[in-house]
Amino acid sequence: MAATRDPGIIPRNNNNPAELSLSSVEDGTTGSATRAPPSRFLVVNGVEMQLKFCRTCKIHRPPRSHHCAVCDNCVDKFDQHCPWISQCVGLRNYRFYLLLMCSALAFYAFILTFSVTRISVKLDAAAEVFSYLVTALPETFALAALSFMAVCVLACLLASHAFLVAKNETSHERYKGRYRSSPNPYDKGVVGNIKECLFDKLPPPRVDFRAAAAAEAELYFGSSVQPYQPAPVATTTTAS
């Protein structure tokens, strides 16, 4: 779910520049290579937020969104681009990303616990403990070392995201220091922030990927293409 779900991609402005009116250029709905569009501002809970213009997507991005250079899309409530899942982490898949980290932490803690238990059972009063582990239990020693490093990394990462959830911030906002000079207008308190992040209903996707796939299939294969249907299986009867 974290790797395949739409993270909150914001649709682009795909209008043909030759067909755009002058008013659309003046109000900043399209980009210009020589002149930056006028800035837009939005007041959120008494704090003025700037709507930055994305020259790639040709839109004014909503607050807390960012254009990912890897995915080449504007993502709502952008947190980061995770290379381990090859996907952006945003509004619509952040809770599944947290669940992925929790399950991975539990998995490696399970491996570490039983690896250490097996080592303690097999280990006797040897003079050189390290050499005994490498020669007698190499696979268990490797699993214990790997799972220990994974538990440390995942625990630190999960603790940092727990802090961000409690503050209602994203990793990108924390890195940029977005709320150093102004209060966070999205902070609802610890309980409210946790509820919003984990339990509030997620908004529907803004991009209809099924319609785009159907339009591309019709473009390349024509409208006569029908979905695949398996042939009926022939049955034979035998006389008794």
Image (cartoon, rainbow, N blue to C red):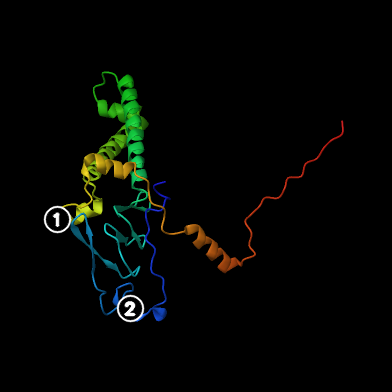
| Callout 2 secondary element | helix
| Callout 1 secondary element | loop
- Residue nearest the viewer, comparing 236 with 131: 236
Residue 23: mark in rendering: 2
* Residue 202 location (% of width, % of height): 37, 48
- Residue nearest the viewer, comparing 117 with 22: 22
Identity of the amino acid at label 2? Ser
Is the C terminus in the top left, top right, bottom left or bottom right quadrant?
Answer: top right
- Residue nearest the viewer, comparing 140 with 94: 94
The residue sitting at 36% across, 34% down in the picture is 107
Q: Which residue has dot 1 on it?
A: 182
Residue 83 located left or right of residue 185 = right
Residue 40 located left or right of residue 70 = left
Alpha-carbon span between mark 2 and mark 1: 33 Å
Residue pushed farthest top?
125
Residue 180 located left or right of residue 165 = left
